[in-house]
Image: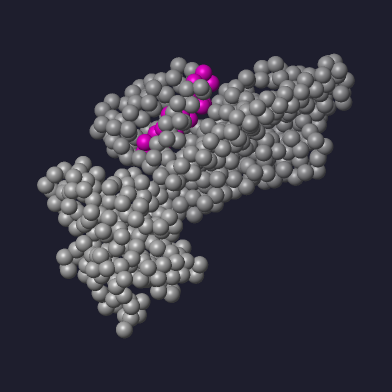
Amino acid sequence: MCPLHGEELHAGRVTEHEISDPALGDKSDAWLLGRARELIASVQRSGKPEQVEIIRTLDSLLEETQRRGEPILVAQMLRASALSRLITASKTDEAEQQLDEMLAHTRRHGATLLRADAHALRGRRLVLAGHEDAALTEIARALALLDDPPSQELGLGRRAWDRLLSTALNDCWIVLNQIGVYEAAEEVITRAHQAVRDSAGPHEITMQLMNRVKMLLGWGLRLERIGRSDEASEKFRTAASMAIAVEAPFAESLFPRKAGVAAVEQVASLAAALALAAPSEAHIDRLRRLRATPLFPFDNPLLSIALARCLESVGKQEEAFELLLEDREHFPEEYPQPSMRIGIIHELARFADRYDLGDPRAQLADYAGALEAELWSMRESQSAALDTRREHERLSAMHGAITQQALQDPLTGLPNRRALDERLRGYATSSASEPLAVALIDLDGFKGVNDQRSHADGDDVLRIVASTLRDSLRGDDIVARYGGDEFVALLPGAPLHAATQAMNRAVTAVDELPRHLSHGVTLSVGLVALRAGERAEEVLSRADASMYQAKRRGGNQIATSAQIGDEAQTEPKNDPTSDADEPT
């Protein structure tokens, strides 16, 4: 998967014949994913009818991957389907359904990187809808997942994992760059580069450099608007250096290009970087030609500002003003970087004020109105922020419930093996619970219930025994389902003789259950005391050995091992005063 913003630009126009993909069932997974990349690469530079056809084709690819059921492939195809809608202006709202499905799918299958990417794409949709603060919250969610991602998941190879990480980070960067949070954007795009630096080919390097050039130019223009001209000039110079550095990888990249022609002669943002760093007549013809190129409509504001400054440098202020005015009147409504609209208006106001062009008061009023509109959108975003924070709290509560469920056995309601292991490890590393008795409990005769009656009856027996065990022990004792028909009880603060009395109560209580409830099952219990410095798995292994002693001696009883020595001894089930567990 091409992990960078330029994935939307790297292929040529897709024809109607190419869009038709018969017999998808005969295609490999790699072919389906490669086809999706080609379509995404083409959709941005296609006309509306062709964009709609590309979306339809991507949906058919999605249906095929869903039929196959490979989780990562399905998530990647959901991403492609959603992204194609985000790129197509009239289909942006439709992306919500795809992104919701992508989030649910990635949560269900533990695909952390693609789940983060789904949040990043939701942020992109929110920017297009004018909800920048809510978009920022989505990016925060994405980055929280990416700050400490699993080292590998769902069988991905290292190269594929790195590319998915870079893709998710880059999608976060796109949103941060669009809303002008440049410091954070710089950090994120650096991480995206680091993720693939060892495996990146010429195309990835090219797109990384191009993306950073665009970011630095937008950053510099914003710094100028708040009077930080020296810092702005430094951003422009850095961007120009990168524009020169991109030449070598550009010649080997997948970017649509003319062979033997320099990158700055073909790529609008690179040409703008050189011009903004040092405005002069030398750039004018190149910028005029690129500005007339229909392939890069979103680069026009950068080109116009750069060209206007070059015209200004040779005394053609009026021509520069008319050029900016034309762009102001034809600024696309769907432009994905709102701050660039203000950049054009600011430039117009500057020219009008400095050179007495047009009506300076009208231009200044226009600029003030644009700033007021931005402030108003920020005010509106506060309401969106409130809703987002409330949603965060709801999700946090839901996460707590999900975490609780992850530690609970769904059949008996007891803590499960994972919860037991965590609690036992905690006891093993703390002296606060000393002494600690550990009982491993197995059901005698349970297999017969399943074999001779039904598994539903077996489940009922497990629930009844679980409830009986819990009721027989103290409130701060822990009973967990260990697996199958085995349970473990932890009795903190109980020496072995006191724990024996407690477990005798449990053995007796199960033995005396009505026959129609217990179906005759009884308990075999192995009881041991946790030793100083003993690991959790070691104490459970000793308890398991003692439990088998009880089973070999007929069951329905407790076998204990002394704290010193491992000789297993048997406790009669109704003799709570027995001290046979004590060392001799």
Point out the image quarter for the C terminus: bottom left
- Dominant secondary structure (helix, strand or loop) of the stretch shown in magenta: helix
Which residue is drawn at the image coordinates 18% and 45% (left, top)? 516
Quadrant housing residue 127? top right
Q: Nearer the viewer, residue 39 or 138?
A: 138
Q: Nearer the viewer, residue 180 or 395?
A: 395
Q: Position of 250 compared to 285: left or right?
A: left
Compared with 441, 201 (above or below) is: above
Compared with 499, 408 (above or below) is: above
Compared with 227, 245 (above or below) is: below
Q: Nearer the viewer, residue 17 or 543?
A: 543
Q: Furthest-bottom residue in view?
A: 584
Which residue is drawn at the image coordinates 24% and 44% (left, top)? 460
- Residue 190, how many percent across, how many down? 59, 48
Q: Nearer the viewer, residue 92 or 275?
A: 92
Colour pattern of the rendering: one colour
Which residue is drawn at the image coordinates 26% and 31% (left, top)? 25
Residue 558 in view: yes
Q: Position of 125 compared to 380: left or right?
A: left
Which residue is drawn at the image coordinates 24% and 65% (left, top)? 573
Q: Is residue 90 magenta?
A: yes
Compared with 569, 291 (above or below) is: above
Point out the image quarter for the N terminus: top left
Q: Is residue 84 magenta?
A: yes
Q: Which residues are magenta?
A: 72-91
- Residue 81, how many percent across, how many down? 43, 29
Q: Position of 288 compared to 196: left or right?
A: right
Residue 455 in view: no
- Residue 397, how many percent across, how many down? 51, 40
- Residue 241, how many percent across, how many down? 67, 46
Q: Position of 414 compared to 255: left or right?
A: left
